[in-house]
Image (tube, helix red, strand yellow):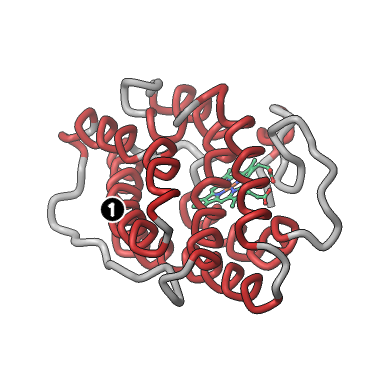
Amino acid sequence: MLPPSTAVVGVARGQDASPRQPAAAGGLLPELRAATRPQHDRIEQLLALQAPMPLRRYAAIVLGFQHFLTGWEQELVDALPARLHGWLAARSRRGFVAQDVEFLAAALPVDVMPAAARCLPAPCLAAAFGALYVIEGSALGGQVITPWLQRDLGLTPGRGASYFHGFGERTGAMWKEFRELAQAEVGDAPADRALAVRAAEQTFEALMLTMGPLLR
Ligand code: HEM
């Protein structure tokens, strides 16, 4: 369930934040979205970013993302062909999360080591795009979350809220480009589609496993 304030900004999961392309019926992206909808709801509840929270809870979430993205990105580099490494690096949001970790240093948890879990069921291109779907898609949610961080914690891009803001107004165009590339690269072979879906599911689970101990 999306909180009412999400509806106010006019972006609900299931509608694209980007200029809408006609979704290919039976395409890869609708399949990924349908398969992972319950996990999206669970992670949204776990993080509970729509509700006011103490700064140290938010700092723990940011640290969790930093830890998670480090392992996730390495798995992707290992799975993607070299021709896509530059493309991947240009979309990385690890620099943004590092800025936030630095800004929030005084509020970070000191005694919890987040779990490390693998995201890809196999080091191949189809699985990589399934895992990418989760993190690329989360940038859409980030556009909704950023104003909440300013409202509740006084954080702004460059001052603690860089990760969720990410590429800001470029987010919609980057999402459109990702969707087209994912469809073209993974194609329609059922075995590849199944690998992408498994990787997306595993990525959501791995992220929840990372965040769990940090939010206890
Ligand atoms: C409180 C936390 C969150 C909120 C409020 C939220 C909200 C949203 C919203 C408004 C959208 C855009 C609408 C759409 O295109 O469907 C979206 C899309 C998406 N979010 Fe989240 N989100 C949250 C957390 C996350 C997290 C932590 C992840 C994974 C790391 C995630 C993954 C996705 C994905 C993959 C999509 C794309 C769905 C699709 O169109 O296929 N979200 N989310």
Position of 15 relative to 31 (above/below): above
Residue at left offset 86%, top offset 57%: 25
Residue at left offset 56%, top offset 25%: 170
The total of numbered circles placed on residues is: 1
Relative to 188, is 70 on the left or the right?
A: left
Residue 193 in sight here: yes
Binning the other alpha carbons within 10 Å of mark 1 as few (below 14), some (14 to 19) or many (20 upward) gives few
Residue at left offset 29%, top offset 59%: 71
Residue 216 in sight here: no
User: Which of 69 and 106 lies nearest the eye of the viewer?
Assistant: 69
Position of 109 relative to 107 (above/below): below
Q: Amino acid at mark 1?
A: Thr
Residue at left offset 39%, top offset 58%: 76
Which residue is labeled 1 in the image?
A: 70
Secondary structure at badge 1 equals helix
User: Which of 50 and 104 lies nearest the eye of the viewer?
Assistant: 104
Q: Is mark 1 within 8 Å of ligand 1?
A: no
Position of 79 relative to 6 (above/below): below
User: Which of 162 and 118 lies nearest the eye of the viewer?
Assistant: 118
Relative to 126, is 77 on the left or the right?
A: left
- The spot of residue 67 in percent (x, y) is 27, 53
- The spot of residue 112 in percent (x, y) is 19, 59
Q: Quadrant of residue 104?
A: top left
- The spot of residue 26 in percent (x, y) is 82, 63
Relative to 198, is 99 on the left or the right?
A: left
User: Which of 126 and 40 lies nearest the eye of the viewer?
Assistant: 126
Q: Quadrant of the image for the C terminus?
A: bottom left
- The spot of residue 19 in percent (x, y) is 75, 30
